[in-house]
Structure formats: structure tokens, C-alpha cells
Amino acid sequence: MNDRPHNRSVEPTGDFSRFLRIPEGRCELLSARYSNQHFGRHSHDRYALGVITQGVEKLYYRGTNHFGTAGTVVTLTPGEIHDGVPVDEAGWVYRMLYIEPTWLNDVVLQGRDGASHVHLFREPMADDPALANALLAAHSTLATSAMPLERETVLIEALAGLFQRHGVELAGQGRSERDAVRRIRSRLDSELEHNLSLETLGLEAGMDPLYLIRVFKREVGVAPHSYQIQKRVARVQALLRAGMDLAEASVACGFFDQSHMARAFKKVVGVTPKAFRDGLFRAAR
């Protein structure tokens, strides 16, 4: 089986750039193709992490030229001087995440190195197909998901995986947290229409967000955001059975809009909310 990274969407022809900021971690996302762009030597105040999906980029970093091809994972440290230039007219395509160091230290690295610590990636590029695929999937979800809890979970897990493989090893905690998980489930059940953050759930459980995700998945089998979606879909079914219309049910259950509800509903139930409602109506007749 070929596990080389692959681009999950069809990119437009010619040079392009798409920039997006999300509130979770104040993360910034870039998708771009550059063939005429030559970045002069500069540095960022954030970690620049991502994957090259097409072409070749030449990068100067710590006195050496590096070449990134399709599937290369990019790991640039804040404050480190680098450039970025194409090696031919085809240029390169990549997807990047720009991560604030203080947030990463506090949430992902769990405060072990202090708020001002900057971890040095000695190599700016790595050939790691599994990680590349994980980062591309995370980038896509962060750019498209309407669920804050899902975006936060995906971002933290992706960065934790990156630092486990190429950075700081995350220490484990072996204590059982079943009572805490029960409290989290109870809160998600009772407030399913609210967009609860991992920080809020972590305070409820007495856990940091990354450990919360791991423990919840171990005990429940899915991440908190997936559990929340399933509970919302179950509530939608109940409301539709009671005669509520689709738009009202969507709002009542905390979905971003009706199309968001429909996608989640079909993934869980196997039919659209409209088909489900119409089937109930036909059965009643």
C-alpha cells in the first residue's frame, strides 16, 4: 500500500494563496503555490509547520540549503533566519500552520518549558509520510470544520504528534480518570447545543487539554467533539420525531447551519434529516 502523502483537494492552476485565521490557538493557515515568489531571508515570530504537496522548494536554514519535495514535512523555529525559492518554473505547493509559541508551550507541551521557551528544530525539513498525511488531514479539517471543539482537538493532536516524532517527547500520566470522563460526558450531554472548549472541559475534569483528549478517547472510544456530534444528531432525531422543522432543530442542537447538520446527520444515521423527517411523515400517514 502506498502511504506517501497526497494532496486531498484539487488545487487551482497557477500561483495562488489562501490565508485563514481560526480562534483556536490563534492559529493561522496558509495554502499556496509559488512559482514566481522568491522569499528573501527572514524569520517568523511563530512556528511555521506544514507539508509540501507538489514541486520543490529550496530553503536556506542555519547555513545550509535544504530541498523539500512532495511529502516533505516543514518545521521552522521562531526567530530562525530562512528563505524560500522555487528551483524551477513549476514552483512548489504547500500547506502551512503558523503557531504561537506561548500557546503551544502552555497547551501542547503542558508548560514544562516555560512560556518563553522556543524549541529549536535543527532540521527544517523531514521525510515522514505518516506525519505528512496527518498534518494534511488536520489542515483540511481546521480550514473547513464549523465545530470549535473539533478544530481545537485536531490542532492539539496534530501538534502533539509532530513534537512526539520530531521535537519534545510528551510525558504520559498513568492515573485512571474514569470519574472525570463521566463528568465531561454529563456536561456534553446537558449542554450539547453549546460550543464548549477543551479548556472549559479540562477545568471540569482537572486535566490539560491534550491529556483530556487521550483519556476521553481511551474511555469512550471517540474524541469529545465526535461524542458531541453524536449527541446532537440524536437530539435532532428526537426533535424531528416530535414534529420540529429542520431549521429549528438545527439551531436548537447547536449546529452552525442546516447544511452542517445535514452532513453530520447523514454520517451518523445514513440518510439526510429531510429524508428522515419525510419517512416519519409517510409512516404517520
Image: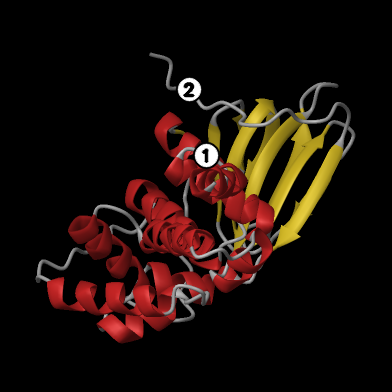
For the point 87% across and 34% down, which residue is it? 15
Query: In this orientation, which residue lies closer to the viewer: 204 or 173?
Result: 204
Q: Which residue is mark 1?
A: 271
Q: Which residue is mark 2?
A: 4
- Is tag 1's residue or tag 2's residue first in the polypeptide sequence? 2
Contact (Cβ within 8 Å) of mark 1 with mark 2: no
Mark 2 residue element: loop
Q: Quadrant of residue 19?
A: bottom right
Residue 66, given in percent of the width and then of the height, sits at 60, 34
Secondary structure under badge 1? Answer: loop
Left or right? Give the position of 7 relative to 187: right
Mark 1: few, some, or many residues within 10 Å (few <14, many ≥20)? some
Left or right of residue 169: residue 262: right
Query: What kind of residue is marked 2?
Result: Arg
* Residue plotted at (86% across, 26% down): 13
Residue 195 or residue 254, whichever sits in front: 254
What is the quadrant of the N terminus in the image? top left
- Res. 45 image quadrant: bottom right
* Above or below for 235 versus 31: below
Callout 2 crowding tier (Cα within 10 Å): few <14, some 14–19, many ≥20: few
Instruction: Single out the mark in the foreground, 1 or 2.
Output: 1
Q: Residue at x 37, y 63 (%)?
A: 224
Residue 124 visible (yes or no): no
Q: Is residue 281 left or right of residue 218?
A: right
The amino acid on which the numbered mark 1 sits, given as a three-letter code, is Val
